[in-house]
Amino acid sequence: MKRIVIAGGSGFLGRILIAHFGGQGFAVVNLSRSEAGSRAGCREVEWDGKSLGLWSHELEGAEAVINLAGRSVDCRYHERNRRQILDSRVESTRVLGQAIARCTSPPRVWLNSSTATIYKHTFGPAWNEDGEIGGTPEVNDPFSIEVAHAWEKELNIAVTPHTRKVALRAAMVLGQGANSVFPVLCRLVRCGLGGRMGSGQQFVSWIHQADFCRALDFILVHDELAGPVNLAAPMPLSNQEMMSTLRQLCHVPLGLPATRWMLELGAFFLRTETELILKSRRVVPGRLLSSGFEFRFPTFRAASIDLLAASES
Ligand SMILES: NC(=O)c1ccc[n+]([C@@H]2O[C@H](COP(=O)([O-])OP(=O)(O)OC[C@H]3O[C@@H](n4cnc5c(N)ncnc54)[C@H](OP(=O)(O)O)[C@@H]3O)[C@@H](O)[C@H]2O)c1
């Protein structure tokens, strides 16, 4: 049975991918900091995300390794959290590279998480993979760009000549369940708080969870896809348009807008950062499209209709 190893597979994306690849008949192994055990659809093996150990044997002969490990970015960016956000990503990438390099039969493909946040805040043309990388200090703290940079650098310097490496520059994944932002947005709308956020002009890039899984399937078999790949639907939209679409679909005619200072205050109490909302992310999937990938949910409306229907069924 072909094996896929997922590092950090206990979280939001991991749970989706375990079900997805398990459903395709793969044996899925989840590398977790929790004690070894079993979770539906996978075998769990303990690791610490930073040092080599018995877990490394799981990579031997595996079809692919997918690294999702990292402390959540949904928190206040104080010194300790910053350090954990950065270290957990860099160290897990480094140790996976070391483990792959020691394999006699290394995995064919290594998909390492990255983020569409790596691109510069923009209201201009959308960024493909060759888009401008960098921070815009008046809008966002350069920290998230520094993390993305360090994360991808660690992947790039890993020497794994027999394993194709891909940096998954994922936009916000729309799905259901814990840690997903979509149900949170719907709750805000239903409470009458679904107006524009900030100016509302900032672009939002996103991808439906089903297309996220399908894109990974596609990357696994398309050997020309190495290096950075944007995982974002082809039609980013403004925050104002996104909120208005959700209000229509939830049949809530009005939504209170949130000004920047209201968001700052809310973010403080919710222990998160406004950058996650206010940065203009206009990212498109250049390499996926030019390789022939077709999105099932290219528009935010279609994605939302599907997710709302699934949540009601
Ligand atoms: N969700 C999105 O929309 C999205 C978009 C773009 C990029 N990403 C990136 O994709 C990756 C996965 O996202 P996700 O939403 O599934 O994240 P998540 O729900 O926070 O899950 C991440 C997993 O990483 C492990 N982890 C947490 N802290 C760690 C630490 N200090 N050291 C090592 N491992 C740690 C945890 O597994 P254990 O506790 O079992 O070890 C956790 O389940 C993240 O790196 C995220 O930044 C996500």
Image (cartoon, grey):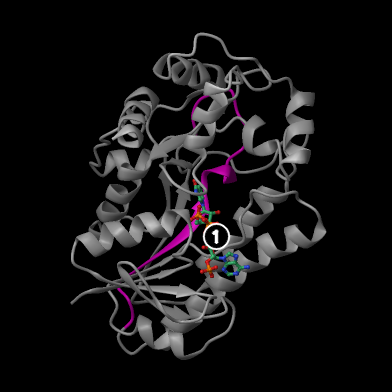
Q: Residue furthest top?
A: 253
Identify which residue, 25 or 289, lies in the foreground: 25
Q: Quadrant of the N terminus?
A: bottom left
Identify the residue position indicated by label 1 in the image: 152
Residue 162, picture quadrant: bottom left
Give the residue drawn at x 74%, y 59%: 81
Say few, some or many: other residues with alpha carbon within 10 Å of mark 1 (under 14 / 14 to 19 / 20 or more).
many
Left or right relative to 83: residue 92: left
Residue 110: say if magenta: yes
The picture quadrant where one finds residue 303 is: top left
Residue at 70% across, 35% down: 274
Residue 172's place in the image compared with 188, above or below, is: below
| Residue sitting nearer the eye, 105 or 312 | 312
Q: Is residue 289 visible?
A: yes
Quadrant of the snapshot with the C terminus: top left
Q: Which residues are magenta?
A: 106-127
> Residue 100 at what x, y percent from top left?
42, 80
Instruction: State the image coordinates of residue 116 (x, y, percent, origin top left).
Output: 52, 44
User: Which residue is at a point 79% across and 32% down the rendered structure image?
Assistant: 265
Residue 258 to residue 158: above or below: above
Question: Closest to the observer: 169 or 195?
Answer: 195
List x then y, in percent, for residue 186. 49, 28
